[in-house]
Amino acid sequence: MTFIGASFKSGPTRCPWDGGRLEWGQRLAPQEGLRVHMPEVFGHLGWRHAQSRGRPFTGTVLIEETPALQSTLVSRLVYIIVAIYAITFATLSVLAHDSFNTHAFDLGNMDQAVWNTLHGRWFQFSNWEGGTTRLAAHVEPILIAIAQLYRIYSSPSTLLVFQAIVMSLGALPAFWLARDKLRSDFAGVVFASAYLLSPTLEAANLHDFHVVSLASSLLLFAFYFIHRRRYGLFLVFAILAMATKEQVPISVALMGLYVALVQKRRLLGGFTTTLAVAWFIVAFFIVIPHFNPAGASPYIGRYDQIGSSPKEIVANLFSHPGTALANLTQPAKASYLMRVFAPVAFLSVFSITVVFVLPDLLLSLLSDFPAMYGFQAHYGAVMAPFVIISGIYGAAFLLRWCRRLFPKGGPVLLHGLSLLVLIFSLYGYYRVVFLPMSDHVPVVTDHDRLAKSFIKTLPDDAAVSALSVLNPHVSQRQRLYLFPDVRDAEYIFLDVTSTPAPIDTPSLEWRVRMMLQDKNRGWGVLAAKDGYMLLKRGEANASIPPEFY
């Protein structure tokens, strides 16, 4: 509400009606701590309706100050929660990296791609046999901006810390949106906490670095600015979100439809949807096939049970819905579906905004790749913000109906729903995140520290082939391969105490012995200790020292 010429002092302030018109000018937002009381003379009509109907106003508008201190303290509490989350998950992520619990997929190839981008070789990486550029797998133009962080500190840890910070910031628009829609600071804190405790979000934060994980907060900011009708900022965050991965434009297109159909901003909504759909088509059907040697996305194979191409998959979903339904009703997928919406106590089902969750949810549920529906990786990052948004709007829907049926029951229901969301989110975090993580908290050992002495012997410009867990530690070079892929590597770095993925331990041992026995290949042992082995092309020594064992 807006007033002009009113002098606001402590205690009630009266703004007179002068000649049938009220002068307006100073905005009174709810968070400024002012409560506005309209006079009873209007009955059930607001003053605008009364004026438009020619009813003169003869009373006063009372403006009472309400304590703003509580809202300020609550806001600071949210900032503290966000900071704690960012510090905690940045620390856990860096510890996981330092204890060799990160992998070639995807911290190794992401670090190499970012490092190459900074040095003018945009999106290039070499530790993946499916191509020589990230564009063969995903379209992530935001990497160009992220690469500038390496001017400050060039390390995979930079990506991990940046990811934790950006993802944590999504709690802020979650707090603002819930506070605005539900008119409750407590509900705002609860939904901000539910976002941070979401298993889909934390799984993404704890599993290496993926650009699409950043979309979790970017999409929340985008929708919050839709809610506030600040469409310029909405477009900024929507474009940033679309730049994180080729699938995100589908979600942005749905947001554009929301702007057009719900908020009646048809021009803006149509423009947003058109831009998003065009971006998706170019990225998925033109860019990836152009750069991928197979001429298509390498992840189509995860949907072979439905179809072998995007066109065939879509056709079969309509012509053979039973196949898709059989996929969706598998116990593991049914459990995943329940756990996705559990952090908001399933309030999402009461809001039309739940449709924003569907694109990525279907991508996960229709897949035959278990990591996509097992809270093991980043695949739920795009869903997390929309689960929170739809939960907030679902709670608002229930509150509206409650006030119609029980006018005095709104506060009780609001606090009840907020407590329910808090309980569900804490329980989901405890069962899905805390318990699995508690038995393998990352710890840096002497064995991990020993690896640094091996890494220091590698020339910066040398081509290196390394096992998956060693890959991210030697990835800032132009030529990097994932063993047993060797190609023109000059060095091979191995750790037989870790997982030998993508091969098994017997295969690893056999390959190394064959390489050392084959004089034509010219491989020898440069150094070996405590399970680490560094092979060099052209090295004469082919024997493994006792220290290795």
Image (cartoon, rainbow, N blue to C red):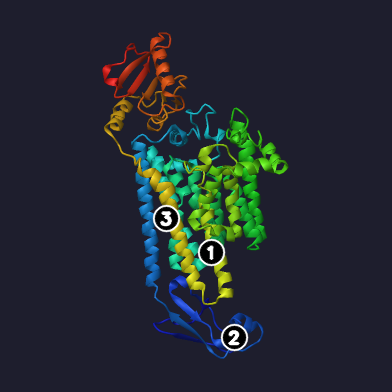
Check whether the beta carbons of the residues at disc 2 and disc 3 lie within 8 A of each other. no
Q: Amino acid at mark 3?
A: Leu
Reading the chain from its start, which is encountered first: label 1 or label 2? 2
Q: Is residue 536 above or below residue 439?
A: above
Where residue 18 appears, as percent x and y from the top left, is 55, 89
The residue at which mark 3 appears reads as 426
Q: Are marks 1 and 2 in contact (CB under 8 Å)?
A: no
Left/right placement of residue 141 relative to residue 259 reads left
Disc 1 secondary structure class: helix
**Along the line of sight, which residue is nearer the eye, 455 or 339?**
339
**Cα distance in 3D space between marks 1 and 2:** 29 Å
Report the residue marked by disc 2.
Answer: 43
The residue where tag 1 is placed is 395
Residue 266 in the image, given as x and y percentages of width and height: 67, 59
Q: Foreground mark, 1 or 2?
A: 1
**Residue at point 62%, 58% (across, down):** 258
Where 284 falls versus 466 (above or below)?
Answer: below
Can residue 141 be seen at all in this image of the molecule? no
